[in-house]
Image (cartoon, rainbow, N blue to C red):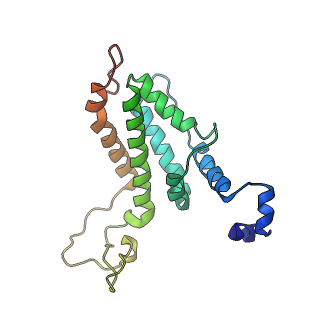
Amino acid sequence: MRKLGSELGVEAMSLYIYVPSEDAILDGIVDLLFSEVELPLTSGRDWDDIARDLFSAFRRVLLSHPKSVTLLASRTVRSFQALAPIELSLGNLRRAGFDRRTTIDTHRGLLSFTVGYVLSEVGGLDTPSDTWGTASSDGRSPRRLHQTARPRHHLRPVEPFDVDHGQVVGLGGEIDGRLPLLRAHVPEGGSAGGK
């Protein structure tokens, strides 16, 4: 709170006039992040296309606020507005005909994949092919991939990695890999979901 107060040019204690605690500030940041997610159109679209668009929009929000990714992974969404992307995801899977347990498991899997993918991006894994990761010379901590300027002799250059394409392919694989499991849990009379 002292650091925040200093940034705002006020005493830390005066912040408590506006917010009850540091947790309230952190929860508010998470709510703001979720409320920034652009919700995709759903009418007449397959569930898997909606899921791809929703979690891609979520990724874009996370990338626009990279220092908040770990915060988001550790907090609970509290406001109704911030719950909209979560409700859309769960409702989309339920409308496709999936049972409650599979709906929750799939939502969590897609959310975990997206957060993990963004963590890998903001952690330096989206680097040009002419840079390579190595351990630091003291052997204690690894260097980030983008901090190493010379390739190791035993590594061959690869094509540059398109992170946007990688996320789309990875998210598609996450969805497609779940299709057999999802179809096995569709209740009698429900749709098979997906293409």
Point 31% across, 78% down: residue: 135
Quadrant of residue 77 in the image? top right
Point 35% across, 19% down: residue: 191
Front residue of 174 and 30: 30
Q: Seen from this angle, which residue lies furthest bottom?
A: 138
Q: Position of residue 188 (x, y in %)?
A: 32, 15
Front residue of 114 and 16: 16
Front residue of 47 and 93: 93
Q: Position of residue 104 (x, y in %)?
A: 42, 35
Q: Position of residue 27 (x, y in %)?
A: 62, 51
Quadrant of residue 176 in the image? top left
Quadrant of residue 94 in the image? top left
Taking 61 as reference, is 44 above or below it?
above
Q: What count of labels does the image hold?
A: 0
Quadrant where the N terminus lies? bottom right
In the picture, measured across the screen, residue 27 lies left or right of residue 111, that is right
Q: Can residue 40 be seen in this view?
A: no
Quadrant where the C terminus lies? top left
Point 58% across, 38% down: residue: 83
In the picture, measured across the screen, residue 89 lies left or right of residue 79, that is left
Q: Seen from this angle, which residue lies furthest left?
A: 154
Q: Can residue 34 be seen in this view?
A: yes
Q: Position of residue 107 (x, y in %)?
A: 42, 38
